[in-house]
């Protein structure tokens, strides 16, 4: 798929076929996603692939009451939990924040990795959607994750049932400020 076509045609997919996404397809997308830019090339983003249905169902219940997301996760054949290793991106080696923005760049970097992953999956015909409403502490406990990590987002993945409508976009005049 041509790059700009991929960027423009990627849509958030929330309804998936039962068909599993083969592990090698996920691995191919992950292999491209790792070329994301990151703070001093610290590469602090990590992906955790959840294929186990029971575990996925338990995670789906940790959505702060936003059952819309429960349905999406349960409907998807696999789930990727996007992790960040805390305290490196945006920080000096001695642990001091380099700028006034503190931990800001941790999930910023993970977001860049996630967009690479979404586009790489899209290139393989696999849909995905970023989910931001979840109970981080409960999911960390389910996944045995200690305080080294934070969860930057959840990403259900699978083959789409139907094309998703593209929500309206800003005009260039709204989007780009030129001074
Ligand atoms: C940080 C972030 C959090 C999001 N959280 C959710 C969510 O909790 N549930 C959901 O259905 N979609 C969620 N989305 C998906 C957006 O609604 C979607 O990207 C937006 O409507 C644009 O549609 P498109 O991705 O098809 O271009 C989230 C997207 C981002 C970037």
Image (cartoon, rainbow, N blue to C red):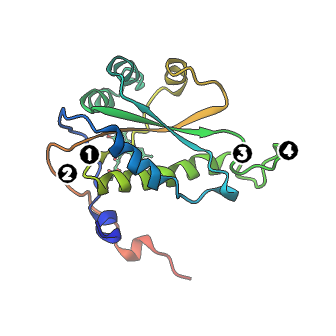
Crowdedness near tag 3: few (<14), some (14–19) or many (≥20) residues, C-alpha within 10 Å: many
Question: Compared with residue 152, is residue 101 higher up or lower down, i.e. above or below?
Answer: below
Crowdedness near tag 1: few (<14), some (14–19) or many (≥20) residues, C-alpha within 10 Å: many
Q: Quadrant of the N terminus?
A: bottom left
Is mark 4 in CB contact (under 8 Å) with mark 3? no
Crowdedness near tag 2: few (<14), some (14–19) or many (≥20) residues, C-alpha within 10 Å: some
Q: Which residue is mark 1?
A: 13
Instruction: Farthest residue to the right: give it.
Output: 94
Q: Which residue is mark 4?
A: 94
Name the mark on residue 88: 3
State yes or no: Cβ of the residue under disc 2 lies below 8 Å from any atom of ligand 1. yes
Residue 168 x %, y %: 27, 61
Whether residue 129 can be seen here: no
**Residue at 37% across, 55% down:** 120
Q: Which residue is mark 2?
A: 164
Q: CA distance from mark 2 to mark 1?
A: 6 Å
Q: CA distance from mark 3 to mark 1?
A: 32 Å
């Amino acid at each position: 798929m041509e790059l700009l076509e991929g960027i423009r045609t990627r849509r958030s997919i929330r309804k998936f076929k039962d068909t599993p996404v083969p592990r090698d397809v996920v691995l191919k997308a992950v292999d491209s996603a790792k070329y994301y830019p990151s703070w001093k090339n610290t590469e602090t983003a990590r992906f955790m692939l959840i294929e186990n249905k029971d575990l996925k169902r338990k995670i789906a219940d940790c959505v702060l009451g936003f059952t819309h997301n429960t349905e999406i996760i349960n409907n998807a054949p696999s789930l990727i939990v996007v992790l960040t290793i805390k305290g490196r991106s945006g920080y000096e080696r001695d642990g001091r924040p380099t700028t006034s923005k503190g931990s800001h760049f941790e999930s910023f970097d993970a977001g860049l990795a996630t967009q690479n992953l979404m586009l790489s999956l899209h290139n393989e015909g696999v849909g995905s959607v970023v989910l931001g409403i979840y109970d981080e502490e409960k999911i960390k406990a389910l996944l045995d994750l200690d305080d080294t990590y934070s969860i930057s987002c959840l990403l259900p993945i699978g083959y789409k049932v139907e094309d998703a409508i593209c929500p309206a976009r800003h005009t260039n005049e709204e989007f780009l400020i030129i001074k």
